[in-house]
């Protein structure tokens, strides 16, 4: 059974499925490092997915679809920034509100603009092209992981690498970290932490928008109501658990992608659909418990805290 | 004073503009929609729609109460949806298998729902206190397994095959919640009102409510003062879950008379309840009007869909926007440091 | 650079924090701005630094009127401020912190660390500061962190340096090093403003002294034209409070005892702690904060586990009891952090007064509490301790620091528990409140309670304690009778957290 799960096509699907979560998690990590408690990734992602289909359908081009996805994500980010940065709204309340608005708006527009319920599909939707890398694609197993993916896959990996240098050596990256760690110090130095956090939110919106595009016009070529299906929340959990650090984040994202892919495969074996759909969430929960318990033990030993 | 008036006006204008644009996008008639909205929320033959609003308000207020209790104690329980579903499922299960009916049966079914949901909530509490998993994340992640477990049960073991849908058998009539005579409104809302009064007493007059409030305002203060915060957290979570379970049971026994896949998730009862509680800054007596308010929006939207062909999701959008405006005006419900107590 | 404040006034709503204050600061001069907590000194300086842009009056720099929109403007004009609570990024290096917000960047926005490192090293060398710019700030001692803050000012070429309560967290040794640095700066023509409430230090180093009280400028004179007494009179606005009388006690019974307790988190050398507090005495633990006082107090209160050893309250073991059991046995606690641990700021005075005692028969029957009794009790506290607050239903957040602290002290002492643990009970509090709190602590002692006082302020320790320990790097010295001890001797025994000369100093400590 294991062989039939872990074949080259599996590697391909792990990569594909991980991309939206990776992009959302990257966006969330930027917000986290900058001190913005953004748990609205689900909403950002969903709006991106819808706008991608909207854009691609009406222009017949995947590029415009992707751009409109980015706009969708940024729109939600602007909403967040307005009510949390410019106005003193609690980030949790604002996040939940935005998740709701995104769900409502995407479903509403699905019905109002496309006149359908549930799923929208059309021939005019252009999917993002896949890129084959000549030599790599021949490597067994890993080849199908790294080659033949959408542009967004390579983009997200590039972003991870760029982010490392960005946060370490670029002035804006340093300021982002400073805003998250001690924003008073940044303010006392004369830099507006609100401005920095605004930039972080916009970047997050753009990245989540891209993630949405991968969901709707790359993995498939359609939009389903509530398409993000909890992936934004998984990204939130990953960001909170890893603290936005690149390597653990990548690890958890691909772990989730692997389990998600495996669960889809396993459905073919007659296991009830609900159980397989539950697997990724249970796996995330287990991973979470593992990480948190270790942290708790560490705290207990070094600090002897009695009441947690 | 004038500044507040101005910002209130500005917010209302913005909402109106959003509302109008959405209606325009749906190719609907503006005035027809407004009329349909009010009729859908408060009108109807013999006020039928108003009664539906009341029925919805009961469920939303119930979930708001559940959220209120937890948040007030500093516990970011956003797993109301999961607790609601588990409660509803358990109550349906017991209702179907109960050998007898009548008031005693109803009582047992409600109890079953409360216990099951309370346990589901405590799982997250155990994860926090013994494994260090933040409540926010733990309760959230339990939402999905709950949803899928319920879906599985009503699609396979408990399924009413003949109905062709993923749902349980119809519960026997003697377990249905009685209706208010002359209407189709079940007495579920009276239960919720009763719970509401109990919760008010809890918040304002009991030692437990007082200790929970102090724990929520500052956990370090609570610990240093000698409050048993671990016990308080677990008890509060159990209570919060139990109330959610009660709401689920009431929905099953009163509104639908069976458990259908997604019937508690689709209408967003849990999330609406959470935002209602947050919107009134966790002031206990205010969740009742807040719940009614949001129920009216949802009913009104249903009316708009029926009559003016406007997708009912407009309710969710308007609801979200109201939350945003209110959240940015009132003092935050959370005073704790990010990363703490979550 | 010459800087002046002309008729500055700052109002927070109806409260006047600074009232028509005019000051002038000259280059090559150390100007001390003194006054007790709440006098308005920091507020006035926050205007000069650009942190507060809502004021009346004028700022004049080198004879030109200036107005700041933010600290950035003040900084580019050459004004720099080191705040009481350091503003440093813990995970970043000294270098990154020093250049933060003024980084040298290339066209694409990338920081040229090499250039920056060179300039920073130059500054370090020319002023002889003992810092390694590659070290992470989290690894630095308090004195070193302050040096980093000052380095930030130097890097930005500040000519006017404002230091807010700089010696509050320093050991006597570090204080001397700081003063040496300040003299160097003065010699190179910089103007220095020292905001402080420590008159002895002012007498040591200042050239000019200005006194503020309740938002008003009382006097501004050269040091040689005034005296310590005159300054003190101006600060208080009346006669100095008389030293508190205490009864002669002959403590016989042990109220609280710790026997060879090992506490996790008490520095790397886990030395066992042993101490006794008799009924009818005040035992003081002196030491600069960060030397293990917090873990020690947490362990006694029950907020931290201990690894071994025993703690006894009235001869009964409490090591295995939780906080509420210890409180019931006879423990009360005045925490150092009144905002987070001592009070729930968004709750009312009534709610804050009764948390530990809510299950007492006096206040509740186990399920319902008696609002009348709670209210009466809190009104009692308010009147006995002269706590200024709207009504007992007002939220605690609206109270001033001193009144908040009085509430905490009142609430804890009113429980009349055997053991009182007071942790920096008068930090950041005005003189009137300090006096009242000290009086009440002595009263408790005279009534036969055991008081454990942990404090950073040497004067407080010496003024209140019967016996004194010093805590340094997690180790507790032997008890010394207060009659035999001088401030000097205590100072020598105190250490700073992460102090690089740690090992030599530890040799001098008793085993």
Image: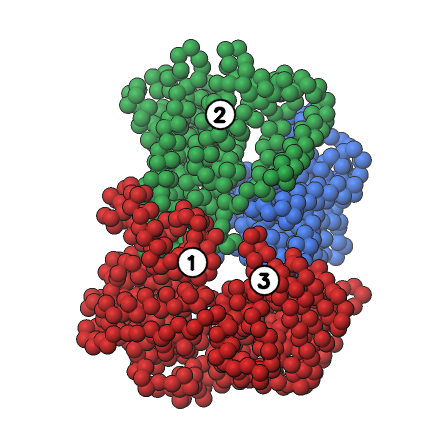
Chain colours: A blue, B green, C red
Tell me the mark number nearer the camera, choosing from 3 and 1. Answer: 3
Residue at image x 40%, y 39%?
B240
- Residue C156 horizontal/vertical position (percent): 70, 73
Q: How many residues crowd around disc 2 within 10 Å: few (fewer than 14), some, or many (20 or more)?
A: many
- Residue in the foreground of this view, choosing between C162 and C105: C162
- Residue B49 horizontal/vertical position (percent): 52, 17
Callout 3 and callout 1 share a chain: yes
According to the picture, the residue beneath numbered tag 1 turns out to be: C404
Tell me the mark number nearer the camera, choosing from 2 and 1. Answer: 1
Chain of residue at mark 2 = B
Side of C237 relative to B316 (left or right): left
What label does residue C18 carry, if any? 3
Q: Quadrant of the C terminus of chain A?
A: bottom left
Residue at disc 3, secondary structure: strand
Q: Look at the image and tell me whether residue A4 can be seen.
A: no
Callout 2 and callout 1 share a chain: no
Number of numbered discs on residues: 3
Residue at disc 1, secondary structure: helix
Instruction: State the separation of the CA atoms marked 3 and 1.
Output: 22 Å
According to the picture, the residue beneath numbered tag 2 turns out to be: B56
Circle nearer the N terminus (3, 1): 3
**Residues at circles 3 and 1 in contact by the CB criterion of under 8 Å:** no
Q: How many residues crowd around disc 1 within 10 Å: few (fewer than 14), some, or many (20 or more)?
A: many
Instruction: State the separation of the CA atoms marked 2 and 1.
Output: 46 Å
Instruction: State the separation of the CA atoms marked 3 and 2.
Output: 56 Å
């Amino acid at each position: 059974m294991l062989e039939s799960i872990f074949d080259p096509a599996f590697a391909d699907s792990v990569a594909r499925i991980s991309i939206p979560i990776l992009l959302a998690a990257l966006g969330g990590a930027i917000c986290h490092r900058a001190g913005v408690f953004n748990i609205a990734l689900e909403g950002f992602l969903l709006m991106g997915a819808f706008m991608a289909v909207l854009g691609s359908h009406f222009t017949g081009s995947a590029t415009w679809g992707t751009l409109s996805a980015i706009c969708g994500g940024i729109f939600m980010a602007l909403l967040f920034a307005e009510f949390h940065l410019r106005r003193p709204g609690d980030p949790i309340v604002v996040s939940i509100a935005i998740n709701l608005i995104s769900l409502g708006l995407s479903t509403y527009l699905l019905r109002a603009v496309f006149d359908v319920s549930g799923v929208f599909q059309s021939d005019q939707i252009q999917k993002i092209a896949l890129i084959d890398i000549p030599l790599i694609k021949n490597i067994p197993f890993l080849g199908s992981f790294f080659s033949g993916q959408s542009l967004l896959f390579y983009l997200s990996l590039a972003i991870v690498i760029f982010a490392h240098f960005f946060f370490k050596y670029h002035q804006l990256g340093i300021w982002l970290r400073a805003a998250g760690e001690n924003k008073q110090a940044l303010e006392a130095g004369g830099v507006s932490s609100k401005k920095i956090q605004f930039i972080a939110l916009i970047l997050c919106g753009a990245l989540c928008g891209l993630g949405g595009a991968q969901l709707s016009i790359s993995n498939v070529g359609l939009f389903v109501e509530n398409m993000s299906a909890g992936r934004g929340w998984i990204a939130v959990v990953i960001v909170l658990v890893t603290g936005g650090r690149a390597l653990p984040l990548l690890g958890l994202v691909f772990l989730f992608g692997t389990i998600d892919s495996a669960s889809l495969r396993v459905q073919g074996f007659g296991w009830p659909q609900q159980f397989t759909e539950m697997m990724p969430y249970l796996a995330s929960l287990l991973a979470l418990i593992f990480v948190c318990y270790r942290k708790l033990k560490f705290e207990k030993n070094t600090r002897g805290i009695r009441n947690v | 004073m004038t500044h507040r008036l101005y910002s209130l006006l500005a917010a209302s204008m913005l909402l109106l503009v959003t509302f109008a644009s959405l209606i325009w996008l749906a190719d609907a008639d503006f005035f027809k929609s407004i009329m349909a909205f009010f009729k859908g929320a408060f009108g109807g033959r013999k006020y039928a729609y108003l009664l539906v609003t009341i029925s919805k308000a009961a469920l939303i207020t119930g979930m708001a109460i559940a959220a209120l209790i937890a948040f007030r104690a500093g516990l970011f329980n956003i797993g109301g949806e999961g607790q609601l579903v588990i409660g509803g499922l358990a109550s349906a299960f017991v209702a179907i298998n109960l050998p007898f009916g009548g008031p005693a049966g109803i009582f047992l079914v409600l109890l079953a729902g409360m216990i099951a949901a309370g346990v589901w909530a405590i799982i997250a509490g155990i994860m926090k206190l013994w494994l260090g998993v933040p409540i926010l994340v733990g309760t959230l992640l339990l939402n999905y397994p709950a949803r899928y477990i319920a879906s599985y049960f009503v699609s396979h073991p408990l399924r009413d095959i003949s109905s062709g849908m993923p749902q349980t058998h119809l519960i026997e009539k003697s377990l249905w919640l009685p209706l208010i005579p002359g209407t189709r409104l079940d007495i579920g809302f009276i239960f919720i009102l009763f719970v509401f009064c109990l919760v008010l007493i809890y918040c304002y007059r009991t030692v437990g409510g007082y200790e929970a409030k102090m724990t929520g305002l500052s956990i370090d203060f609570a610990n240093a003062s000698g409050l048993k915060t671990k016990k308080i957290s677990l008890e509060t979570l159990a209570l919060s879950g139990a109330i959610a379970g009660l709401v689920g049971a009431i929905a099953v026994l009163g509104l639908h008379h069976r458990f259908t896949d997604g019937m508690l998730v689709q209408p967003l009862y849990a999330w609406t309840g959470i935002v209602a509680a947050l919107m009134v800054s966790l002031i206990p007596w205010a969740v009742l009007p807040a719940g009614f308010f949001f129920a009216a929006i949802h009913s009104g939207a249903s009316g708009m869909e029926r009559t003016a062909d406007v997708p009912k999701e407009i309710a969710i959008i308007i609801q979200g926007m109201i939350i945003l405006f209110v959240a940015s005006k009132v003092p935050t419900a959370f005073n704790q440091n990010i990363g703490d107590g979550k | 650079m010459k800087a002046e404040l002309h008729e500055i006034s700052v109002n927070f709503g109806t409260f006047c924090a600074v009232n028509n204050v005019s000051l002038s600061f000259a280059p090559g001069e150390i100007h001390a701005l003194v006054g007790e907590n709440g006098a308005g000194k920091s507020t006035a300086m926050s205007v000069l630094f650009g942190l507060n842009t809502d004021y009346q009056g004028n700022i004049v720099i080198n004879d030109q009127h200036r107005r700041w929109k933010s600290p950035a403007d003040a900084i580019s004009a050459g004004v720099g401020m080191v705040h009481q609570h350091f503003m440093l990024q813990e995970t970043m290096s000294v270098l990154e912190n020093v250049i933060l917000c003024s980084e040298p960047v290339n066209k694409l926005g990338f920081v040229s660390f090499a250039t920056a490192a060179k300039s920073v090293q130059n500054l370090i060398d020319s002023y002889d500061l003992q810092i390694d710019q590659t070290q992470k700030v989290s690894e630095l001692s308090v004195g070193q962190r302050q040096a980093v803050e000052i380095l930030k000012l130097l890097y930005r070429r500040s000519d006017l340096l404002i230091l807010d309560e700089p010696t509050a967290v320093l050991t006597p040794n570090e204080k001397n090093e700081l003063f040496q640095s300040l003299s160097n700066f003065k010699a190179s023509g910089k103007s220095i403003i020292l905001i402080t409430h420590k008159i002895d230090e002012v007498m040591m180093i200042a050239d000019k002294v200005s006194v503020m009280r309740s938002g008003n400028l009382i006097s501004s004179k050269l040091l040689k034209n005034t005296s310590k007494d005159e300054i003190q009179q101006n600060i208080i606005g009346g006669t100095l409070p008389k030293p508190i009388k205490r009864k002669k006690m002959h403590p016989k019974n042990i109220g609280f005892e710790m026997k060879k307790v090992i506490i996790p988190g008490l520095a790397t050398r886990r030395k066992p702690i042993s101490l006794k507090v008799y009924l009818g005495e005040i035992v003081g633990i002196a030491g600069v904060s960060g030397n293990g006082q917090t873990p020690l107090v947490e362990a006694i209160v029950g907020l931290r586990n201990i690894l071994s050893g025993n703690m006894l309250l009235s001869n009964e073991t409490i090591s295995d009891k939780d906080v509420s059991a210890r409180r019931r046995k006879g423990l009360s606690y005045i925490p150092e952090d009144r905002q987070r641990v001592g009070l729930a700021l968004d709750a009312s005075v009534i709610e804050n007064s009764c948390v530990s005692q809510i299950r007492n028969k006096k206040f509740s029957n186990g399920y319902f509490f008696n609002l009348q009794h709670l209210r009466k009790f809190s009104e009692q506290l308010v009147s006995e301790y002269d706590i200024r607050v709207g009504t007992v239903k007002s939220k605690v957040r609206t109270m001033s620091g001193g009144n908040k602290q009085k509430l905490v002290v009142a609430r804890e002492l009113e429980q009349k528990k055997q053991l009182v643990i007071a942790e920096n009970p008068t930090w950041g509090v005005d003189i009137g409140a300090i006096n009242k709190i000290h009086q009440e602590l002595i009263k408790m002692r005279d009534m036969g309670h055991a008081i454990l006082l942990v404090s950073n302020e040497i004067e407080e320790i010496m003024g209140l304690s019967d016996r004194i320990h010093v805590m340094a790097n997690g180790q507790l010295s032997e008890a010394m009778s207060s009659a035999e001890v001088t401030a000097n001797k205590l100072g020598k025994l105190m250490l700073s957290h992460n102090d690089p000369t740690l090992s030599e100093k530890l040799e001098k400590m008793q085993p």
